[in-house]
Amino acid sequence: MDEIKALYTEAVELLTQLIAIPSFSKEEDGTAACIEQFFKKKQITYRREGNNIWASNLYFDVNKPTILLNSHHDTVKPNAGYQLNPFDPIVKDEKLYGLGSNDAGGCLVSLLACFVYYYNKPALAYNLIIAATAEEEISGKNGVEALIPQLPLIDFAIVGEPTLLNLAIAERGLMVVDAKTIGVAGHAARNEGENAVYKAVKDIEWIQQYHFDKVSDLLGPVKMTVTSFATENKQHNIVPASAEYLVDIRVNELYQFEEILNTLKANLNAQITPRSTRIKSTLIHPNHPIVKVGESLGSICYGSPTTSDKALMPFPALKVGPGDSARSHTADEFIFLLEIEKGIEFYINLLNGVL
C-alpha cells in the first residue's frame, strides 16, 4: 500500500507538470520532454521518436508475449467557455483542474505508475511496453500509427482513456464520404437541363430513411448523417450541373467499411469517394483474458461511441481508464484525485490477473 501511495503522489506531480505545458496535437514537444525527464528520474531506459516516447520492462524477454500500455499526451485546444486558466493545475474540492487532466492525463500517469510498479519485477508472464503517444486527438499519422511498426509483436493492448474504469470492448468506426451528383446545366426559365440538386435531395432522403440490418448489442445501429451540402452554381437562373454533400458514417463492429460503401453505391445517384477509412470499428472478444479479469474487478463491458487510438491498432485492445468521457473537451476540465489513485490500483490489479 505504501508503494501505491508513493506512485500516486508521483503520478499527481507528473500530471500537474503536464497540464502546465501546452500540448496541442502536433505541438507536444514540451510534454514529451517532461515525460522523458520522468523516465530519467526513474532510471528507466526509453526511446523517443517525434513526440512518441516508449519503454520496456527491465526483464524484457523476446520469447514472451507482450502487452502494450498506451495513452496520449496531446490535447485539444481549450474552448471559449473556460473560466479557469487551462494551463494552471489547481486542486479544489479534491479535483485537479486543467486542460488534459481528464482526457487523457489521468489515464497516462496512472498507466505510467502501473508500469513503474512492474518495471523491475522478474518472471512476469508477459513483457510490458509503455507508450505515451502524440496526435491522438486528431488521429494523426505521427502518433501511435507511426510507433507500432517499431515495436515488437504486440499480443494485446490496454488503451488509457476515461471510461470510469469500465471496459470499452468495442468502439464505433468513423468513415467520411464525399458524394457528388452530376446533372446537366440549363436555363431555369426554359425547363432545361438535369438538376443535380434534385438528385442529391433524393440521395439525402434515402440516407435519412435507410437502416442497416445488423444492429450491435454493444454499439447499436450504423448511423449516417449528411453534414454539408454545396453547389458551384451561384446564379439563380441556372440549373446546377453538379452538387456535393458530405456523409458522416458511424459504423458498428458488425460491418466492414467495404460493405457500407457497396450499399451506398448500389442505392445512391452520387459518385461516392471515401475521404477517410482509417478509423475502423473495433472489438476485443468479451472472453479475452484481460476482459474477464476486468469483470472480476467489478467493471462492466460496454461499447464506446467515441474513437481512440484503439482504432489504429492491428491487435486486440481494451480501452479503460480513470476519469469520465463526459468531461472530455469541456470547459474547466478536471479529474478527481481519488480517480487517479483508484486508476493506479485498478491497472495494477488488472495486469496482476494475467502476469
Image (tube, rainbow, N blue to C red):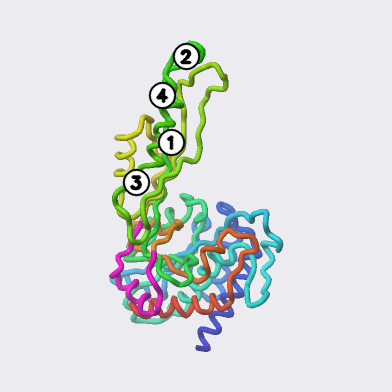
Q: Position of residue 119 (x, y in %)?
A: 44, 77
Q: Position of residue 288 (x, y in %)?
A: 30, 69
Q: How crowded is mark 2: few (under 14 residues within 10 Å), some or many (20 or more)?
A: some
Magenta stretch? Answer: 282-302
Above or below — where is 25 with respect to 128?
above
CB contact under 8 Å: marks 1 and 4 = no
Above or below — where is 3 with respect to 176?
below
* Residue 292 highlighted magenta (yes or no): yes
Tell me what residue is drawn at x 44 percent, y 24 percent: 196
> Dot 4: what SS?
strand
The quarter holding residue 351 reads bottom left
Q: Position of residue 263 (x, y in %)?
A: 30, 40
In the foreground, 122 or 174: 174
Tell me what residue is drawn at x 32 percent, y 54 percent: 215
C-alpha gap between disc 1 and disc 4: 13 Å
Residue under label 1: 178
Q: Where is residue 85 in the image (x, y as percent from the top left)?
A: 70, 62
> Dot 1: what SS?
strand
Residue that extends furthest to the bottom in the rendered view of this protein:
2
Residue under label 3: 211
> Dot 3: what SS?
loop
Q: In the image, what residue type sits under mark 2?
A: Gly
Residue under label 4: 182
In the foreground, 281 or 181: 181
Tell me what residue is drawn at x 39 percent, y 72 percent: 300
Q: In the image, what residue type sits under mark 3?
A: His
Residue under label 2: 186
C-alpha gap between disc 2 and disc 4: 13 Å
Q: Which of marks 3 and 2 is in front?
A: 3
Q: In the image, what residue type sits under mark 4?
A: Ile
Q: Earlier in the sequence, mark 1 or mark 3?
A: 1
Q: Which of marks 2 and 1 is in front?
A: 2
